[in-house]
């Protein structure tokens, strides 16, 4: 593969607009490493949630960001073995008389062979064509002239999306959406979003997080939380989300291993390039590792900017903080949909700038836990102190619930 880092930003812009349907942020780099349009084709659907897993269908397959209910690493994008689902959906299809070797001819190179994965079942006759399914590929024998057929590969995602609802339910083991439900005015969701800054070693953080899980709180990814607010995903009754501000190294050394151990998704609002000051912030390589481990990475500007004053003194500088931090992260780390206002400072002009810059939601430091679609750029959070006891965190959660006039989940 050629090194195309220099024009990566061009790729990002193109990929997000292909076919009019954007590639979902968590798949931006996975799409690229799976061969982008050349191998996966174009987005056929927007992202949809199946339970706690985010899925997106492309012409030639499906990418997924697995949730905790799956056996896969949480949040780490994977190219689904959709051929296995298609085989289940089509169980009972008539066997084809052709030999497996007739299909293998379409996978001539080791690269094509590896991308396709193992063959799934024996050849079947489907939609009038002899068909062999592979884990991530489909090959059909198509007529090219009277009496002559040629093995043609491709369109696994398109074929799967074209199944009936019942067939897809059989393939997935449960009813599975390909379209987002249309919800004009979604109900507000109640979910504490905890904010951490410094961490106090892995053991203390493990105790802290374990105590919260033992209280019955259900961790959800930020993508699921926002999809819930937007009305196209459901959240468990006692959902909560974890966020880490400022990109401190301790979060990388102490919190990340514990999050992986306990399979808890979290979002890191980071400052790309800020490590140059030598004050103990993550490097861009470490941010990339955090994302590769399945966590969400969001922007917290380049310089921890105080945006309401900056936007009045120097609009260009304020725009750079918001726009370039996202561009840097999208080039080097992964897609970025979320923003955290430094020092919790924002006003209407700042909200407009963040919204216009392509973000989908933003978090504040205001204490609360009720989130509605019209306030998704002013999401409230709950300050969590890694030094504090469970009792202190419970008090903070109860205070946030009281501020918003709802019952506390713990
Ligand atoms: Zn901060």
Image (tube, rainbow, N blue to C red):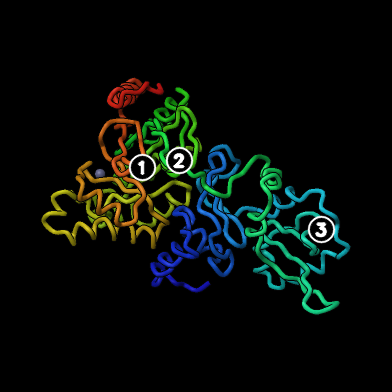
Q: Write the residue at 58% across / 45% down.
A: 177
Q: Is residue 256 among the parts visible in the rendering? A: no
Which mark lies nearer to you, 1 or 3? 3
Q: In which quarter of the image is ligand 1?
A: top left
Instruction: Farthest residue to the front: give it.
Output: 184
Counting residues from the start of the chain, the first of labels 3 and 2 encountered is 3
Q: Write the residue at 66% across / 46% down.
A: 165
Residue 246, percent from left and from top: 29, 46
Q: Nearer the viewer, residue 60 or 272?
A: 60
Residue 344, percent from left and from top: 23, 41
Counting residues from the start of the chain, the first of labels 1 and 3 encountered is 3
Q: Is mark 3 within 8 Å of ligand 1?
A: no
Q: Do the residues labelled 2 and 1 touch (CB within 8 Å)?
A: no
Q: Does residue 212 lie above or below 81 as drawn? A: above
Q: Mark 2 points at which residue?
A: 231
Q: Nearer the viewer, residue 289 or 371?
A: 371
Q: Is residue 177 among the parts visible in the rendering? A: yes
Secondary structure category for the residue under label 2:
loop
Q: Are marks 3 and 2 in contact (CB under 8 Å)?
A: no
Which mark lies nearer to you, 3 or 2? 2
Residue 47, percent from left and from top: 51, 51
Q: Does the residue labelled 2 lie within 8 Å of ligand 1?
A: no
**The disc label shown at residue 124, or none:** 3
Secondary structure category for the residue under label 1:
helix
Q: Quadrant of the C terminus?
A: top left
| Cα separation between marks 3 and 2 | 39 Å
**The disc label shown at residue 218, or none:** none
| Cα separation between marks 2 and 1 | 31 Å
Q: Write the residue at 81% across / 58% down.
A: 124
Q: Name the residue under label 1.
A: 251
For label 1, the crowd category at 10 Å Cα-Cα, with few meaning under 14, some 14 to 19 and many 20 or more, is many
Secondary structure category for the residue under label 3:
strand
């Amino acid at each position: 593969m050629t090194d195309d880092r220099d024009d990566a930003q061009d790729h990002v812009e193109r990929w997000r607009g292909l076919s009019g349907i954007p590639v979902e942020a968590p798949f931006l780099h996975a799409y690229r490493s799976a061969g982008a349009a050349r191998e996966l084709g174009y987005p056929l659907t927007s992202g949809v949630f199946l339970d706690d897993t985010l899925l997106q269908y492309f012409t030639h397959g499906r990418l997924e960001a697995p949730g905790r209910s799956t056996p896969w690493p949480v949040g780490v994008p994977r190219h689904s073995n959709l051929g296995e689902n298609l085989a289940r959906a089509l169980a009972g299809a008539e066997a084809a008389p052709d030999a497996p070797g007739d299909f293998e001819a379409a996978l001539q190179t080791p690269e094509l062979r590896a991308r396709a994965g193992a063959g799934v079942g024996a050849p079947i006759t489907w939609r009038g064509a002899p068909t062999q399914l592979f884990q991530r590929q489909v090959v059909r024998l198509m007529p090219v002239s009277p009496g002559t057929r040629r093995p043609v590969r491709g369109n696994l995602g398109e074929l799967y999306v074209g199944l009936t609802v019942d067939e897809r339910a059989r393939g997935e083991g449960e009813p599975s959406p390909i379209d987002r439900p249309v919800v004009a005015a979604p109900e507000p969701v109640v979910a504490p979003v905890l904010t951490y800054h410094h961490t106090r070693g892995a053991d203390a953080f493990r105790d802290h997080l374990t105590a919260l899980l033992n209280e019955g709180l259900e961790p959800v990814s930020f993508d699921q939380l926002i999809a819930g607010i937007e009305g196209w995903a459901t959240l468990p009754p006692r959902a909560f989300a974890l966020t880490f501000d400022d990109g401190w190294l301790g979060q990388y050394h102490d919190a990340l291993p514990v999050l992986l151990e306990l399979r808890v998704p979290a979002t890191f609002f980071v400052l790309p390039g800020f490590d140059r000051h030598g004050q103990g912030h993550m490097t861009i390589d470490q941010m990339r590792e955090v994302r590769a481990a399945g966590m969400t990475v969001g922007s917290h500007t380049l310089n921890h900017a105080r945006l309401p004053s900056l936007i009045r003194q120097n609009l260009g500088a304020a725009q750079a903080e918001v726009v370039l931090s996202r561009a840097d992260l999208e080039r080097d780390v992964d897609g970025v949909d979320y923003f955290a206002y430094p020092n919790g400072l924002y006003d209407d002009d700042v909200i407009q700038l963040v919204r216009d810059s392509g973000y989908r939601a933003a978090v504040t430091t205001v204490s609360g836990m009720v989130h509605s679609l019209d306030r998704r750029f002013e999401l409230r959070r709950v300050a969590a102190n890694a030094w504090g006891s469970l009792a202190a965190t419970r008090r903070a959660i109860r205070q946030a619930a009281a501020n918003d006039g709802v019952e506390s989940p713990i």
